Amino acid sequence: MEIASLMSLIGLASGFVGAMTGVGGALLAVPLLLTLPQLLGFQPVTVHATTGLAMVQGLTTNLVGVIVHRRAGFVSGFLLRWTGSGIIVGSLLGSVASRWLPGRWLLLMLGFVLLFCSLQMLRPVPEVEHEADFAYPSSTRFIAAGLLTGILSGATGLGTGSLTIVLLVHWLKVPVRIAIGSTLGISLLAALTGTLGKALTLQVPLVEAFGLSLGAAVGAVLGAKASHHVSARTLRHILAAFIAVAAIHALWRCAFGVAG
């Protein structure tokens, strides 16, 4: 198997999960990128290359996913405008700064952020389906949430989906399906600037990125369509499970060493 083919399979799986849950797929892509190549006899992917590839994968998944969710009416212009503006600035700052952060520190940050998100997603929330039934609070809170998630996700390569979903649903009380669709749109803005920052600092291997993007595009179409037939409660539980596994994996590698 060629490395590009392996990356396409990783992209397919992570794109499906990302578009279905709104997290962009990096939650699954990151641990797979860190382990599968080496297990199958390829050159190990370093932490910095992994975060760069995760940004590329997120860009593809978010772009395709938001198109499908928007057609179903699950993308909010209000969220794209205000939360997205904070994320653009934060993601660029975080992604560029990550160039000078040790790989072990990136994994430690990644693990604790994911663990927090997993626990939050298990909490019950009102199952409101339509944007018309929701009153948006102050735009300042959405900008602040975007800035925070942008900095953290840009540094770890996670994309903005996991933290944004948690803050929108549990802090700002946005309906789950609106949060999922809008988060893909918000994350698309961050992925554009985040990928630029990773590319300018030479953290994106081109062959691997190409294969990853092809698989992610197909997976995103399938995942976004599947999410429209799954209950919001089930989506939250699926998301929490993926986040927990990724958190444990990142903390394990941080504790026992990793190539940076």
Image: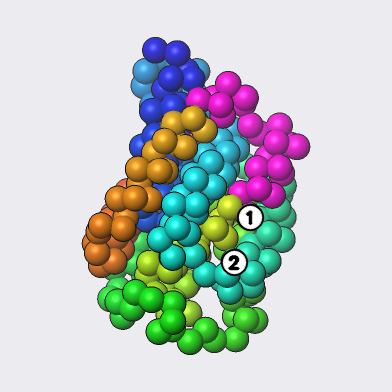
Dot 1 and dot 2 residues touching (CB under 8 Å):
yes
Extent of the magenta region: 190-212
Q: What residue appears at the point 38 percent right and 28 percent down from the top-left corner? A: 9
Disc 1 residue type (three-letter): Leu
Q: What residue appears at the point 68 percent right and 66 percent down from the top-left corner? A: 85
Which image quarter is the C terminus in? top right
Tag 2 secondary structure: helix
Q: Which residue is mark 1?
A: 189
Q: Is residue 250 visible?
A: no
Q: Which mark is residue 17?
A: none
Q: CA distance from mark 1 to mark 2?
A: 9 Å
| Towards the viewer: 250 or 30 | 30
Tag 1 secondary structure: helix
Q: What residue appears at the point 71 percent right and 32 percent down from the top-left corner? A: 202
Residue 250 appears at what percent x and percent y?
42, 45
Disc 2 residue type (three-letter): Leu
Q: Which residue is mark 2?
A: 80
